[in-house]
Amino acid sequence: MTEFWVGTSWKMTKTLGPAREFARGLRARRDWPVRPFVIPPATALATVAAELGPDSPVRLGAQNAHWEDAGAWTGEVSVPQVADAGATMLEIGHSERREHFAETDERVNLKVHAALRHGLLPLICVGESAEVRRAGGAAEFVADQVRMALAGVPDAVPALIAYEPIWAIGAAGRPAQPEAVAEIAATVAAAAGARATVLYGGSVDLGNAVDLALVPGIGGLFVGRAAWQVSDYLSIVDRVG
Ligand code: PEP
């Protein structure tokens, strides 16, 4: 297995039947040329964990968790709860959560600390809007997001940072250009230091995965829609592995 990460978040898709089917496809796979991870909805975490079994090389993540360990936060789940269900990593700050659920940079930082308190690997999503990019401020914007997300986190603590430009998410075959990804990967590395592995996400698919995987400074791919069938996910793994 190389150090190159390839993972997918299912967002708000899949009931337990399709989740189980995906997990069985993962379990049937013996050799992994990459570091695989899957981020199901919270309702499917325990089921996917059980299907994969205790020694699976596939890491499981949660799409969100609250920064408090417990309390009167109706409708939320905590880091200890998602860890209990099988998550060993936590996605934080996806642009959909920033836009629709008031996930501010301050809350992203609180969640990073909550993940680390409980031994989960943070997968922090950053990325600029089309307006910010047009105005020439993408690198500075992303660097600020990274610095705020990691405030108070010691340098030696590892984290994954997914560069996901908002304008490239769900953009059907129009990811960021490799040159733009390389520039931001260098920016993130400068802001985060050696502890960070930079992933790219945003309309990755089977056709463009290799080009994006070869971008200097990129240590993984974070795939959405194009990997929601297990056979498609495994094809991308094979293509870049
Ligand atoms: C995402 O939303 O994080 C994502 C990468 O989605 P897609 O690949 O579907 O653009």
Image (cartoon, rainbow, N blue to C red):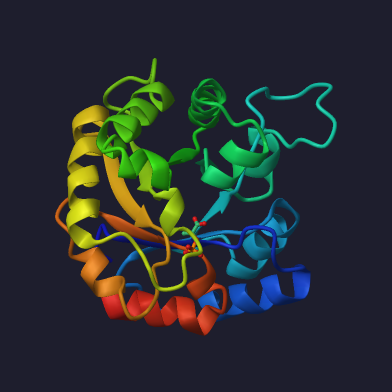
Residue 237 percent coordinates (x, y)? 36, 75
Q: Nearer the viewer, residue 157 or 27?
A: 157
Outermost residue toward the top in this view: 152
Q: Nearer the viewer, residue 122 or 47?
A: 122
Q: Quadrant of residue 33?
A: bottom left
Q: Quadrant of the C terminus?
A: bottom left
Identify the residue shown where x is 40% and y is 42%: 131
Identify the residue shown where x is 40% and y is 73%: 173
Identify the residue shown where x is 33% and y is 55%: 200
Identify the residue shown where x is 26% and y is 38%: 136
Residue 215 percent coordinates (x, y)? 18, 60
Q: Is residue 174 above or below residue 151?
A: below
Q: Is residue 130 above or below residue 40?
A: above
Residue 77 percent coordinates (x, y)? 73, 37
Query: Is residue 154 rendered to the left or right of residue 92?
Result: left
Q: Is residue 109 above or below residue 7?
A: above
Q: Using the rendered image of the protein, determine whether residue 52 is visible from the camera's viewpoint.
A: yes
Residue 46 percent coordinates (x, y)? 70, 56
Q: Nearer the viewer, residue 15 or 120?
A: 15
